[in-house]
Image: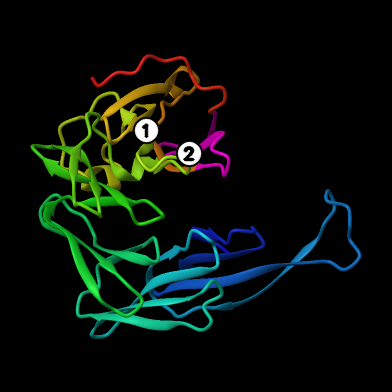
Amino acid sequence: IPKVYETLWNKSGDSFIVRYLDEGTENIISFYAKLIKKDGDTDIKTNIYSLDGSFLQKNITDLSVSPAGKNIVYVIKKQSGSSIVNSEFDGKNGSEIFNSPLTEWTTEWFGNNFLLKTKPTYKTGGFIYQLNNSGNMTKLLGNINGLTTLGRNDGTALLYSESTDNSFNLFSFKTADRKIIKINKKTLPEKCVWSKKSKTIIYCAVPNFIPSSQYPDDWYQGSVSFDDTVWIIDTEINLGSIIVDPNTYSEPSVDGINLILSEDENYLIFTNKKDYSLWGIDLTPEPPYETTGD
């Protein structure tokens, strides 16, 4: 399938959803496919699989997979706005949980609920809501320019950024008491991942230098990029330490995105936005770096 721009996998890795633009149109196509193993083939090196699947609805503008990898929540564009739908991973048994006259929504799983977010720009104040399966919404944050977020899977906290003075700041937000802490290191939530073992720890690709620009728009569009080091940060005490400087090993330098932790949290995987190369960091044993709040 040519011009695929996004692929999302289920937890077991035997099914995926591939997303691409329909040739000659602007329709967004989402296709569910399951890997079917050839009967009698037991050699893992020569396993042959076929694909069996079906098309989801056209023009799904945003889609995210549940932490368990069994369900999806997505935004479907309509003539009069958009709808938020929760379904099984293959798109079956979907239930419409929210309708909106707006179309520029993004979604994210957040515990047993969802984060419903306006698309970010430095020009306009963004909003983020918590949405449940009954369609009830609670505003978490609002009127924040350049608002981008990353929630913890358990729904207890989130990271968010705010555009300011041709730069940006990073904050943590606790849902229980709505406590906000400004993180000492400047980076974007899209360059971070929450720890699976600790509710306060994040791993982030942190820019060594932030050029004066309009964030996050210019970074999204590729007119600005960063040279990052990888940090581990405790959001509660606001201290962190450098894990590794990828630029020691890479030409071009690294602008880290799509951070993923292994289930045992022994490995950190990320993509270099500059050339889309895949990187991995061994997190064991714990790196002997000094902790700093600078």
Relative side of 6 to 51, left or right: left
User: Callout 1, which amino acid?
Assistant: Ala
Relative side of 294 to 283, left or right: left
Q: Residue furthest right?
A: 40
Q: Quadrant of the N terminus?
A: bottom right
| Residue drawn 47% across the image and 63% down it | 66
Q: Provide residue 116's location: percent of width, then percent of height.
A: 28, 65
On the question of residue 278 being in view, the answer is no
Q: Which label belongs to residue 205?
A: 1
Residues drawn in magenta: 261-282
Of the pair 2 and 140, the residue shown nearer to us? 140
Residue 154 appears in which quarter of the rendering? bottom left
Q: Quadrant of the C terminus?
A: top left
Q: Residues within 10 Å of mark 2 (few under 14, many from 20)?
A: many
Q: Residue furthest front?
A: 177
| Residue drawn 45% across the image and 80% down it | 57
Q: Which label belongs to residue 270?
A: 2
